[in-house]
Image: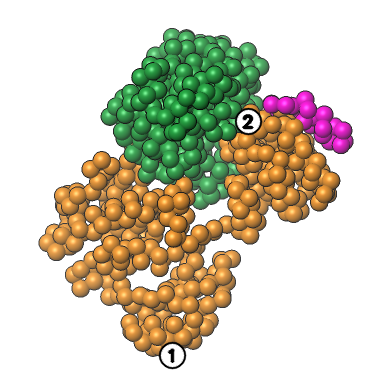
Amino acid sequence: MAVLLTKNSKILVQGITGNQGRFHTKQMLAYGSQVVGGISPGKSGETVEGVPVFDTVEKAVQQTGADASIVFVPAPFAKDAAFEAMENGIKLLVMIPEHIPVKDSIDITTRAQELGVTVIGPNTFGIISPGEQTKMGIMPNHIYKPGPIGVVARSGTLSYEIAFSLTNGGFGQTTVVGMGGDPVVGQTFISVLHHFKDDPDTEGVVMVGEIGGSAEEEAAEYLKNFGKPVVAYLAGRAAPPGKRMGHAGAIIERGRGTLESKEKALTAAGAQVVTMPWQVVDALKELMARR
Amino acid sequence: MKQYEYLAKGALREHGIPIPPGRLVNSPEDAYEAVEAIGPAALKAQVLVGGRGKAGGIRFANTPEEARETAKAMLGMDLKGYTVERLYAEGKLDIEREFYISVTTDRNKKVPLVMASLAGGVEIEDVDDSQIVRQWVDPRVGVLPYFGRELAQRLGLEGVLAREFADLVVKLYQIYREKDAELVEINPLAVVDGHLVAADARLNVDDSALFRHKNLELIDEGSEIEQKVHKIGLAFVELDGDIAIMANGAGMAMATVDAIQYFGGKPANFLDAGGGASVEPTAQALDVLVSMNPKVIFVNIFGGITRCDDVAKAILQVKNTTGIPVPLVVRLVGTNEKEGVRLLEEAGISAYSDMAPAAERAVELAGEGRS
């Protein structure tokens, strides 16, 4: 079982003929994802890894019945691609690109809310459901395995580090969701946690947060009635204020978004906050045994 | 990207928001002419550091001659590490009251947020929450005049000030949208002769939207070395320690800095070599780390998209050209790990597969640590 993304999801790849689009289409197919079509204006009739290419999402949806799409187009064109997908009935939209203007992200998430579209990202590694052998994203295939842990993360490679340690430590995953590193993204910790709460197969959750914003603090409020063990690792303990730490959203601004504030809120809500990424597995073992 | 005050004021003026009379000053002669035209003025250093007044970056001139001498002293001066290249001469104001207003993005609600207060003139963080009025904007609707009238009413403004305020909110939101602003702020929003004037302004433009604003002068506030790495296209923050760090991905790079500090070491920098960086930029980034003369260099890679053999090649390239004169600790796992580790071992560099012992070793080699 899994949340948001299942093996039934029929996936389009917008920007399939670009380098990234091609490479990750191959990787997604290898993992087992049901990639049914790709979009690249002017390239209809071609195929990429055996996947038919269409000029428009409209045509692709008509021909394939796709209900999900992953976007690889360059950031300046990402809003257009996102709206094209949403207006044509796509219900799960994964936005990979970094450096999408915040104004565009606001417009995308606002429209998504009206249409009931789930947006993952922007600036995300995507989403993977190991138990269903399907993924929409750029994460490496070999580091996950099926199991009872839900993972929700703001950063990519750090979540790989932690997912791999979970896998090696005997904890497989239901679904791993990358919220994205931008200030405005489609998902909050709360929206993803909500899915994990409702999913009977998810027995525990790992949150990978970081400095900046207050998504973790808001999540803490929600966690008070969550009912499943939660371990959180937060990156940026040593980060100076006022500096953007790689992610557009990872910045302590005017005293807000500090690690201390997040740690305090999550701890008060009953989550186990660990100091270092390699401490996640042991903390989870302890919490799971205590249930 | 933060904008200089004169550019922020320029944006306000373009949109019809009243600002004090002012002129950009590039030379002592400019200062003379500016004060001749606008009368007694403040000469304000155009640098992007806070607290510039206290640091001597704002001085007053009553006469053109005085302005020329003051400008002579200020132009080229060092202000908290930044050289003053431009001044902004602005007419003195007889301020009756000071308000605050800003438009920014609420990251949780994912919509624009307008904040206002009658207690302006101080940093908004220092204003008690009960004195701040917040109104969120539906981005599909934008800010119409009624939104401003409601805000004015909540603040308790009446008459001319309420009318001017409502009008100003509409214009400020236009700037937020048109300029792709992260923040547009007027503080203080002054009352002068019973009318509103934007006495000081901040405008921060979304870095990701710069492709839509090609006319903007690119301002990198970073230190010399930060600017150098930014030009390679990588995220870099200089810290004050002596263990140089490279990792792939922003989260990993943050965690790596944290890990060094956890073991009692002092990180020299944050460097995200990218989620899928290839040989060349990785080698360039390493070159920069070498040039910082650190005690140790710590490379921490979890290869997902990044290939371990590419990272190894980059390390060997730097080792064989510029050289790596300090101890190097490498943690390398993931895609093409075996090949990467083999390449390094052939060159006499051993790689760790776990982050914790690698970070601990880096700290130990730097002669730091807790024990």
Give the camera-side residue of B365 and B256: B256
Image point (26%, 67%), residue name: B18
Image point (19%, 56%), residue name: B166
Question: Whole-percent x and y of residue A128?
Answer: 52, 20
Kind of residue at badge 2: Ile
Q: In which quarter of the image is residue B317?
A: top right
Q: How crowded is mark 2: few (under 14 residues within 10 Å), some or many (20 or more)?
A: some
Is B12 placed above or below A108 here? below
Q: Is residue A268 magenta?
A: no
What residue is shown with label 2? B305
Subunit bearing disc 2: B
Image hue for chain A: green
Kind of residue at badge 1: Glu
Image point (16%, 49%), residue name: B146
Question: Whole-percent x and y of residue A92?
Answer: 40, 23
Question: Whole-percent x and y of residue A40?
Answer: 46, 31
Boundaries of the magenta span: B335-356
In the image, the chain rendered in orange is B
Q: Which numbered dot is residue B65?
A: 1
Left or right? Give the position of A54 relative to B305: left
Question: Whole-percent x and y of residue B81?
Answer: 59, 66
Element under label 2? loop
- Distance (Cα) linking label 1 and label 2: 63 Å
